[in-house]
Amino acid sequence: MQRFTGYRRSLAALVIAMFSMAMGVGFIVPLLPVYADMMGATGLWIGLIFAANPFFRAAFMVVFGALSDRMGKKRIMSVGLISTAFLSLGFIFATQVYHLFILRVLQGVCSAMIGPVARAYAGEISPSHKEGQVMGTLNMGFFAGFSGGPLIGGLFADRFGFNVPFVVMAILSGLAFLLIRLYLPEQSVSKGQAEGASISLELLMESLRLYRHRLVTGAVLLRSSVGIGHGIFSTLLPLIGQLMMGLSSSQVGFVITARSVAAAVLQPQGGKMADRYNRRWVGLFTSLLIPLGFLMIPFAGSFVYLVGAGILIGMGFGTSVPSAEAMAVERGREHGMGRIMGLNEMSRSLAMAIGATTGGVAMDVLGPVNAHVLAAAVSVVGLATAMWFLRGYRPPNVEVSTRI
């Protein structure tokens, strides 16, 4: 039974919007580290530039997630998308390393209004016992867009220069804004919620107090346990590919695309697995593919080998993320979907920010091999911790204790 009338149409609008936005963001992934290096950035600066987006996204996700429960999710997403479109053009005029850092900070704030709010909207419209399929479908749109972005962005950069991908990123963010405004219904907001809509410390603290619930903490940790390793991967792969292996921007983009295609293709299957089997164990065993892929990267002696490592990491993401987000949806129905998704995305982004900074420092001090071994080790420790918090998890029709 559908929770809201026409939920499939709303989900389709969200998927297409996420696809457009993610493709635009993916355009600059293989370019940004090299762009910063051309401006004379050190490994630490490159790490900070990459970390700025997820760190400030993390700082604001919980607030905007909770605010969307009170003001309406369509409104919050719209502001984030149109702001991202204009900020994308700012990269064209950047001349100093700190310009890139500031732009990434502002991008992070804007993206806090998009990803977690879109997932909260999808969580609210998902029918009971189909949470995995709905979240897998939404994530398929994101990963499919992101998969094409790095390759196309790299080709544009090789042929037309670094400015063109930023222009196209702005156009795609604007397209996503139009889709949300035209085709996504605004969900009703109660009078009490609307009157309480404000960005405040109390709003943030209300959301953070959800960590008192053991299954909330476990679901969040499962989603973010590989975030540190992912941050290291995103920071170092373009440098390893272009500066150490002599690959072109389009080849580096192809590696990232291969990872994202694998993640996108497997999202629906991962969602079905999450709805059919125990989500705790599905999330654990499929996530273990990610640290295995991290360990392969430093020993890559060829472009093909590097592509294989990227595909393995993508397979882990594609099959594990729906389980983690389905468990988050379960908790969102109890504690507020915007709050839970904001908390979920905040923790993942903060982990990515730490990983990006760590990757930059490790590149300067330890070298790329030790950086990727560190990424794999941290991922495994994070997964083990998530499993401890999720002990005793049962499907949503079985009552379990959720407090620590």
Image: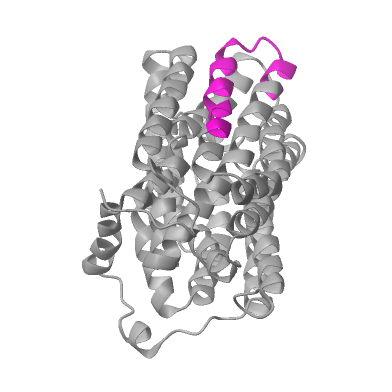
Q: Quadrant of the N terminus?
A: bottom right
Predominant secondary structure in magenta? helix
Along the horizontal axis of the image, is 108 left or right of 312? left
Q: Position of residue 339 (x, y in %)?
A: 38, 63
Colouring scheme, one of rainbow, by chain, secondary structure, one colour: one colour
Q: Which residue is painted at 69% across and 69% down in the image?
A: 13
Please state which of residues 277 and 343 is positioned toward the viewer in this rendering.
277
Instruction: Tell me the quarter of the picture where residue 203 sits.
Output: bottom left
Q: Is residue 140 visible?
A: yes
In the depicted structure, whether residue 243 falls above or below residue 230:
above
Q: Looking at the image, how many numbered discs can be counted on the residues? A: 0
Asked which quadrant contains residue 389, the reply is: top left
Q: Is residue 367 magenta?
A: no
Residue 270: image x %, image y %? 65, 44
Question: Looking at the image, which residue sits at the far front?
Answer: 398
Q: Is residue 49 above or below residue 251?
A: below
The one nearer the camera, 169 or 178, is: 178
Image height of 156 relative to 248, above or below: below
User: In the figure, 340 relative to 253: above or below?
Assistant: below
| Point 63% across, 61% down: residue | 173
Percent across and percent down for residue 50 are 46, 39
Whether residue 289 is in magenta: the answer is yes
Q: Give the x, y percent position of residue 398.
A: 45, 56
Stretch in magenta: 285-307
In this orientation, does residue 42 appear? no
Q: Is 105 on the left-hand or right-hand side of 275?
A: left
Which residue shows up at 55% across the image and 35% down it? Answer: 35
